[in-house]
Amino acid sequence: MDTLIPGLFVYFVLTIPAFLVLALVGGLTRSPRLRLAAEVVVLSGCAALLVVVVDGAFGKPLLWLVVALLVAVLAFGVTMLVRTRGDRF
């Protein structure tokens, strides 16, 4: 458990450039699969950051606001991904 939280944070940090590259290439090539991959990468990074922030929120109650915001972003992102999935393919 000691290496899980730092590992998830590193994963979150690595999803940022991966998202940027996938979104840029997907935008230039107009590939719906690359755009979908970019959205999945950013949502998985958000989920990883959520676990890291929840772990820290037990010590600092103010972080629960960030947890609520991350849950809202994750729920909205997954909802939009599911709704537009049929339009892309």
Image (cartoon, rainbow, N blue to C red):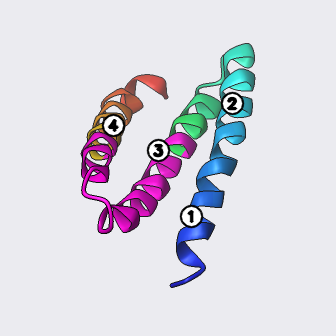
Identified at 40% across, 23% down, the residue is 87
Please indicate whether residue 65 sits to the left or right of residue 34 in the image. left
- In front of the other: label 1 or label 3? 1
Does the CB distance between marks 1 and 3 fall below 8 Å?
no
Please indicate whether residue 57 sits to the left or right of residue 16 in the image. left
Q: Earlier in the sequence, mark 3 or mark 4?
A: 3
Q: Earlier in the sequence, mark 1 or mark 3?
A: 1
Residue designated by label 4: 73
Residue designated by label 3: 43
- In front of the other: label 2 or label 1? 1
48 in relation to 19, above or below? below
Residue designated by label 1: 8
* Amino acid marked by disc 2: Leu
**Highlighted range, magenta:** 41-70
x then y, percent, for residue 86: 38, 30
Distance between mark 4 and mark 2 Cα atoms = 18 Å
78 falls in the magenta region? no
Q: Earlier in the sequence, mark 2 or mark 1?
A: 1
Residue designated by label 2: 20
Q: Earlier in the sequence, mark 2 or mark 3?
A: 2
Query: What secondary structure predominates along the stretch shown in magenta?
Result: helix
Identified at 40% across, 55% down, the residue is 50
